């Protein structure tokens, strides 16, 4: 069972997350030959204050 874990900075819409799940699932089917029904995708939204970029939080960078 292919499993993809994806971390995204908070702020993506539900529609964007659906698109990520769909496209990642399809890529795993194509790459592994696994049936779509066995593919799992987990998206974790990370608060901007918990996402560091070059030693600074994304929140402090205004991202």
Image: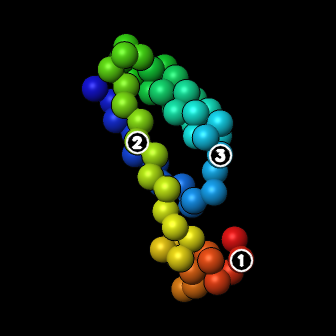
Q: Earlier in the sequence, mark 2 or mark 1?
A: 2
Quote the CA–CA distance across marks 3 and 2.
Answer: 15 Å
Residue 12: mark in rendering:
none
Q: Is residue 54 in view?
A: no
Determine whether 44 is above or below 26 in the image.
below
Quarter that holds the C terminus: bottom right
Question: Is 20 placed left or right of 32 in the picture?
Answer: right
Q: Who comes first in sequence, dot 3 or dot 1?
A: 3
Residue at figure coordinates x 40%, y 42% from the top left:
42
Q: Are marks 3 and 1 in contact (CB under 8 Å)?
A: no
Question: Would residue 60 appear left or right of 32 to someone viewing this image?
Answer: right
* Viewer-proximal residue among 26 and 50: 50
Relative to 12, does residue 36 appear above or below in the rendering? above
**Residue picked out by circle 3:** 13
Residue at horizontal 58%, vertical 33%?
A: 18
Of tags 3 and 1, the one toward the viewer is 3
Residue 43: horizontal and vertical position, in percent?
A: 46, 46
Residue named by callout 2: 42
Question: Who's the residue at 53% across and 76% down the image?
Answer: 49
User: Which structural element holds mark 3?
Assistant: loop
Mark 2, Cα crowd under 10 Å, few <14 / some 14-19 / many 20+, is few
- Residue 17, image x, y percentages: 58, 40
Outermost residue, front side = 14
- Mark 1 element type: loop
Mark 3 / mark 2, whichever is N-terminal = 3
Q: Which residue is mark 1?
A: 62
Task: Between residue 22 and residue 12, name the one nearer to us.
Answer: 12
């Amino acid at each position: 069972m292919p499993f993809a874990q994806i971390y995204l900075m908070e702020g993506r819409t539900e529609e964007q997350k659906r698109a990520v799940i769909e496209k990642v699932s399809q890529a795993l089917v194509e790459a592994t030959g696994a049936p779509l029904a066995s593919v799992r995708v987990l998206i974790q939204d990370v608060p901007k204050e918990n996402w560091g970029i070059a030693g600074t939080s994304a929140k402090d960078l205004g991202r």
